Amino acid sequence: MVDNKGVDAAGNSRRDDRVLLIVWHSRTGAAQVMANAAGTGAMDEPGSAVRVVPATVAGPDDVLAAAGFLFVCPENLGSMTGEMKAFFDRCYYPVLGLIEGRGYATAISAGTAGHGAEAQIDRIATGWRLRRVAPSLIVRSGADTPATIAARKRVSRDDVQSCRDLGRALAAGLQLGIF
């Protein structure tokens, strides 16, 4: 049993101060590559703990158990993908008031923009009282036609490395107690 302070019946915290939760959704493969690269980078940090969980599976217990977050998704029609929105819909109220001050970052796969999805996630994070701890990483494919938008995406080596670096930085920050 968990009370409204995020502790179990014995008074033990449900949060592991080292766990980075990476929640992702992908339609064309790019955001999944980005999430996995960030997870690999996080695991490169000695002593780190990371969970890379699809948005369709992640729930309130995953959020409560994490010390920090990386939200990774594509931008579709100027907004975050529907499955990522469904994750936030499922989790928003069950964890509201229980995760204030935890750090978060975003990684967005986009055709030519990315800022719409970033803004939506930032609004939700503001409601949860999370702290942005890294600038948003927006990977743009340049896709701008129906065929290129729907096509499987490739993420450049440099962008994969940027995702790894972001994951490692988030894990290091959690390890050092910076966020």
Image (cartoon, rainbow, N blue to C red):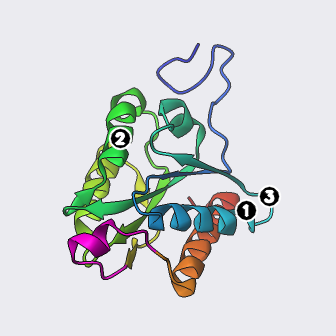
Q: Amino acid at mark 2?
A: Phe
Which dot marks residue 117? none
Return the mark for residue 47: 3
Q: Amino acid at mark 1?
A: Met
Which residue corresponds to the image point at 39% horizontal and 71% vertical from the top-left? Answer: 136
Say whether residue 108 is magenta.
no
Kind of residue at disc 3: Gly
Q: Residue furthest bottom?
A: 158
The answer to whether residue 150 is magenta is yes
Magenta range: 141-153
Q: Which residue is mark 1?
A: 43
Tag in front: 2 or 3:
2
Quadrant holding the N terminus: top right
Disc 2 crowd rating (10 Å Cα; few below 14, some 14-19, many 20+) is: some
What is the quadrant of residue 7 in the picture?
Answer: top right
Q: Is residue 151 above or below residue 66?
A: below
Name the mark nearer the viewer: 3 or 1.
Answer: 1
Q: Which residue is mark 2?
A: 88
